[in-house]
């Protein structure tokens, strides 16, 4: 039971962080993680994005569509296979991910142990 209660506390802490993150940056945590992925390795297919983030294809598609509407990512056709779509950051998406700071949002003590500075 102790593990279950700890997981509940972690989930609440992550949810609180996500609310503040969305308020500060105008994107949800999943959108932020996609920005981070594309900043580090771009372009990526929606399937690869979903796999790397552990999201279903449906959820990945919804997140990407939302980000396209916000002007943060754009689609490009594959060079070898024109049926394959890839995604990369727009200038606005890159500006946004570079503006995200770890110390902008208070992180609960419970989550602080999860971060390591590299």
Image (cartoon, rainbow, N blue to C red):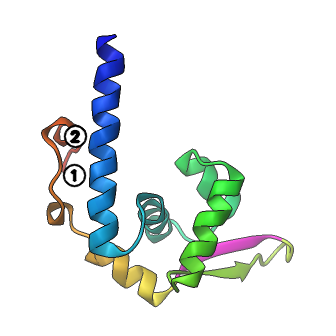
Q: Residue at x 75, y 73 (%)?
A: 85
Horizontal side of 90 relative to 25 (left or right) equals: right
Above or below residue 61? Residue 115 is: above
Residue beneath label 1, please?
118
| Mark 2 vs 1, N-terminal side | 2
Q: Quadrant of residue 29?
A: bottom left
The kind of secondary structure element at disc 2 is helix
Camera-nearest residue between 63 and 5? 5
Disc 1 crowd rating (10 Å Cα; few below 14, some 14-19, many 20+) is few
Outermost residue, top side: 1
Visible residue check, residue 46: yes
Q: Position of residue 71 (x, y in %)?
A: 52, 86
Q: Magenta part of the protein: which range?
A: 84-89
Q: Quadrant of residue 102?
A: bottom left
Disc marking residue 14:
none
Horizontal side of 53 relative to 20 (left or right) equals: right
Disc marking residue 111:
2
The kind of secondary structure element at disc 1 is loop
């Amino acid at each position: 039971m102790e593990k279950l209660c700890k997981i509940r506390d972690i989930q609440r802490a992550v949810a609180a962080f996500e609310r503040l993150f969305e308020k500060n940056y105008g994107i949800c945590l999943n959108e932020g993680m996609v920005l981070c992925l594309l900043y580090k390795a771009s372009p990526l297919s929606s399937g690869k994005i979903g796999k790397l983030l552990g999201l279903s294809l449906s959820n990945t598609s919804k997140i990407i569509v939302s980000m396209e509407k916000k002007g943060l990512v754009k689609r490009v056709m594959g060079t070898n296979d024109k049926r394959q779509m890839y995604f990369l950051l727009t200038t606005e998406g890159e500006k946004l991910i570079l503006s995200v700071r770890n110390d902008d949002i208070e992180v609960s003590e419970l989550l602080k142990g999860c971060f390591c500075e590299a």
